[in-house]
């Protein structure tokens, strides 16, 4: 925080407000004053302060009442109480209600400044702690956004350009193509990176909770609202609000959201006045939102409000030259995550990955590689270690496209549409291979004994051994 801390001074006596303002102004604070508890509440609803310094005895809403309301609203805001009647009981009560400290009246300049400094430090610490925890995770996730294909270079260029601005970005693309990663990357390359990135999955919030999730509520606004809630929009103040799966927003929420975006303010449920928010919105959809709007399933006005900059994440099949890069990254991550030893992709395995169509895009690639790394026995990952079916371009001969000899037999259903007979044949072949392998091992490689055990002629067995490359 480089700006001077914003302090709200609350006192019903004008000369005290003046003295305090001059005194604190000298020490580099930026002060605003309210002449009553009520006025203070109105001001904190509209502006944000780093600390509140309030008188105890005031007509109307007194210091203690104000403290309770402020704490219900924002538990992290430090409040310092100034009082002329500081009995032990009173101090105890004030502290119990959540004040940071209590200063007796008449006050000394040194004491006020010192207390305020400490209160601000604590407020900052609490806030930073919370932000840091969130950001650490986000930064880690967003740190690797790879691509070398011309299509991804265009994406990176666009991200660089829009990140600087406050323009709303609509990211469209298939599932798993990297829309969320793109949104995080916009945030982390923007001047807002130190502020929160708030991701909201619009398809995952129950409709009856939606308004309070987005806009917040005051304490007691409805049954179950026993704590005030800021709401996700206000949480993103100064940062980035990521509206994921925005096509899933119910129409009535679309209206409310549009209004909030236009006015740049939100009103909590149960509250009369709205609060300003400094908003930057990035939205994502895996449907064509323009089509949704044309079909009447999405409000056109909101579509245009979101679609200021359109970013389309290209599907992975259109940029196979990114696959080796991504594959190496995901393999390294899988090895680390699962504590595997050295692992490498065989050239055939890499070829197979590059040739896949990847309807599940980058996410599916990441999963396939993790599974391949876990299932592979030695250091080298072979085509047969992947969970999906061989594409027509095919797994290498001798690969085990569907099954893995790891105790039981696992049948992986490939992601792409399959020819059932063909699938069955492959499963049967893979099973046969495993059985032959095991029986051979049991007979220590003696083909005659193995053939007898399998009920095959020795000749037939040898043909199969060759066929499967055993
Ligand atoms: N270019 C990339 N570089 C590195 N990792 C990527 C890249 N693109 C996607 N990923 C990874 O793939 C996974 C899916 O990406 P992401 O969640 O961003 O996709 P999405 O488009 O939001 O998918 P959905 O529509 O299903 O929500 C994540 O684990 C992400 O980290
Ligand atoms: Mg997503």
Image: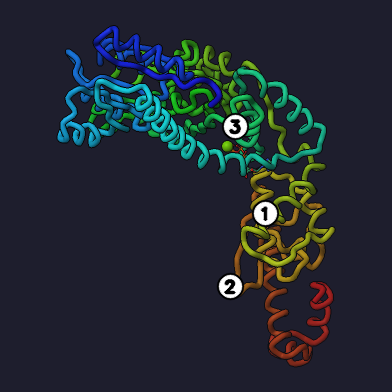
Q: Earlier in the sequence, mark 2 or mark 3?
A: 3
Q: Earlier in the sequence, mark 2 or mark 1?
A: 1
Residue 53, label in figure: none
Under 8 Å from ligand 1: the CB of mark 3? yes
Q: Relative to the observer, which residue lies in front, 323 or 396?
A: 323
Q: Residue at x 72, y 74 (%)?
A: 433
Residue at the image point whose x is 42% and y is 29% from the top = 117
**Quadrant of residue 437 within the rendered picture:** bottom right
Give above or below for 66 relative to 454.
Answer: above
Quadrant housing residue 33: top left
Residue assigned mark 2: 408
In the figure, is residue 12 to the left or right of 335?
left
Q: Residue at x 71, y 55 (%)?
A: 332
Q: Are marks 2 and 1 in contact (CB under 8 Å)?
A: no
The structure residue drawn at horizontal position 79% and vertical position 54%, both measured from the top left corner, is 352
- Which quadrant contains ligand 1? top right
The residue identified by callout 3 is: 286
Q: Secondary structure at mark 3?
A: loop
Above or below, comparing residue 321 to residue 403 in the picture: above
Residue where numbered disc 1 is placed: 333
Disc 2 versus disc 3: distance between alpha carbons? 37 Å
């Amino acid at each position: 925080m480089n700006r001077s801390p914003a302090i709200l001074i609350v006192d019903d006596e004008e000369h005290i407000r003046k003295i305090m303002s001059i005194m604190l102004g000298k020490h580099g604070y930026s002060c605003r004053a309210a002449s009553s508890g009520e006025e203070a509440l109105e001001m904190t609803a509209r502006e944000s302060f780093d600390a509140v310094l309030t008188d105890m005895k005031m007509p109307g809403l007194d210091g203690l009442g104000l403290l309770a309301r402020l704490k219900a609203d924002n538990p992290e805001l430090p409040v310092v109480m100034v009082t002329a009647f500081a009995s032990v009981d009173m101090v105890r009560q004030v502290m119990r209600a959540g004040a940071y400290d209590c200063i007796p009246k008449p006050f000394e300049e040194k004491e006020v400044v010192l207390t305020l400094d400490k209160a601000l430090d604590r407020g900052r610490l609490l806030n930073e702690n919370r932000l840091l925890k969130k950001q650490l995770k986000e930064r880690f996730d967003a740190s690797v956004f790879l691509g070398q294909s011309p299509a991804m270079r265009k994406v990176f260029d666009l991200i660089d350009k829009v990140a600087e601005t406050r323009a709303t970005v609509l990211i469209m693309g298939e599932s798993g193509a990297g829309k969320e990663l793109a949104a995080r990357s916009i945030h982390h390359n923007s001047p807002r990176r130190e502020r929160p990135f708030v991701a909201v999955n619009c398809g995952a919030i129950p409709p009856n909770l939606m308004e309070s999730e987005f806009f917040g509520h005051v304490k007691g606004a409805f049954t179950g609202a026993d704590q005030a809630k800021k709401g996700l929009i206000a949480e993103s103040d100064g940062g980035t609000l990521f509206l994921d799966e925005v096509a899933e927003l119910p129409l009535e929420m679309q209206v409310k959201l549009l209004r909030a975006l236009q006015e740049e303010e939100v009103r909590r449920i149960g509250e009369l006045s709205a609060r300003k928010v400094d908003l930057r919105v990035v939205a994502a959809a895996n449907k064509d939102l323009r089509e949704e709007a044309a079909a009447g399933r999405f409000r056109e006005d909101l579509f245009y409000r979101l679609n200021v900059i359109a970013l389309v994440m290209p599907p992975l099949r259109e940029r196979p030259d990114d696959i080796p890069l991504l594959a190496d990254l995901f393999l390294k991550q899988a090895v680390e995550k699962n504590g595997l030893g050295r692992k490498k992709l065989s050239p055939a395995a890499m070829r197979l990955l590059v040739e896949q169509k990847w309807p599940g895009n980058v996410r599916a690639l990441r999963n396939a590689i993790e599974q391949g790394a876990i299932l592979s026995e030695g250091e080298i990952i072979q085509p047969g270690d992947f969970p999906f079916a061989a594409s027509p371009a095919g797994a290498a001969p001798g690969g085990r496209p569907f099954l893995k000899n790891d105790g039981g037999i696992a049948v992986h259903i490939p992601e792409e549409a399959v020819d059932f007979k063909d699938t069955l044949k492959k499963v049967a072949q893979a099973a046969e291979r495993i059985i032959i392998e095991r029986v051979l091992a049991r007979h220590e490689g003696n083909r005659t004994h193995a053939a007898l055990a399998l009920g095959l002629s020795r000749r037939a067995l040898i043909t199969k051994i060759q066929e499967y490359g055993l």
